[in-house]
Image (spheres, helix red, strand yellow):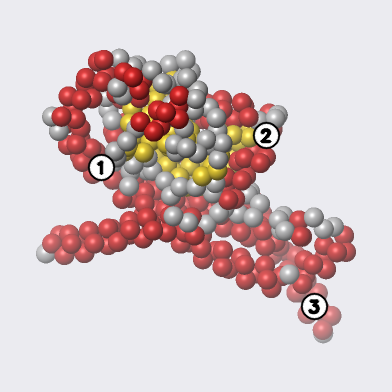
Amino acid sequence: MYTEDLTVIVVYAVVGYFLVVTFTALLRPIVFLFEPVFRAINRLQWIISNPIRFLWKYEGKMSRCSFITLTMTGITACWWIASYFITFPFRFVTGLYYDIILFSAISFSDNIDEFIKPKRGKLGYLKGGKYFFFYIITLPFRAVKMIMKSGLYILDSILMFGISLVFPTLTMLHGTKFREAGTKIVQGGEWRVGPGNYAGTGVYFGLDSKTAKYYAKQTALADNDISIVLVRVTLTFCKNTATLKDGDRRLIGLGDSGEQLAKRVKGIYRSMEHWRRDLGWWEYCLLTPGKMNSSISSWMVRPVALTRNGKVIRTYGGFFHYSLGGGMFFGILSWIIIVWLLLSFAPNYLN
């Protein structure tokens, strides 16, 4: 009887193992399959945020004068407030997909995979009998770790979703090499500020896959080393380079002058928008003056997926926990604002 019970347990364990492995392997690509739909909604939000952006593609006095006129007359402020409310449904839908559904599908799959098929730590390097021995004795520890990380991933997604609702957030792409770059970004939450410096010192993002692929190829060692990080970016207030002063515009594309440009952008602006006329696309820079060739972390950027050659993949060890960094403060602040608004307006609406 004991042998029969043990056999049943082993069979269930083996079947369960393969079911879980299959589930986690399929969950990521199936959820990611719908990403183009939400990328389109994301672009609509981007268009509404500044419908005259196409007029500011090229530097010149006209762009600068129109910017000053719209700002001084209050039209810019009025449109910003109007677009903030108009785009709320877009922020809600994209936030729900990227911050909750996609991020949870990938992070929980990675978390389960790390419990079943550990790839980091000592177990990631052992083989044969040693691997089996340490696999068994570390099961309780890995189970506790999986549960704790699951709780943190839930908190991460809630905080990220709150920020997306309160602070206008867009899904953007960052292209880089897979090894020692793309993986480190999602594992550690740190971004390398490169020496490119075209439109200011900082971390660069694009709206289109072709933009990210272009820069990934610049750093990748081979075609199979190309990776793209899907990132939720809160640009706060973004400055268009075409609306800069003439002296500042002349610093664009001059390499080391990007540091000087980043320092000149002051006030409420923390990011830069620039039309690359030579390449035919928009680029966005999260400004970090004084940080060239350094690693930075910011609550304004939140990876939700890592792709390699166009396919969403597992991140060994899982994503870094947004809630353990600066995101905790801004996430809680966002939900305080949301709750306050609900308590303030919901009773009046119901009455």
Q: Amino acid at mark 3?
A: Leu
Q: Image point 33% across, 27% down: which residue?
A: 240
Q: Earlier in the sequence, mark 3 or mark 1?
A: 3
**In front: 294, or 40?**
294
Q: Amino acid at mark 2?
A: Asp
Percent x, y for residue 13?
A: 73, 68
* Alpha-carbon span between mark 3 and mark 1: 61 Å
Residue 116 drawn above or below residue 50: below
Which quadrant holds the C terminus? bottom left
The residue carrying mark 2 is: 225
* SS state under label 2: helix
- What residue did someone put label 1 on? 84
Q: Looking at the rendering, which quadrant does residue 308 occupy?
A: top right
Q: How many labels were placed on the picture?
A: 3
Circle 3 residue: 6
Horizontal side of 316 relative to 263 (left or right) equals right
| Residue farthest toward the right in the current orientation of the protein | 129
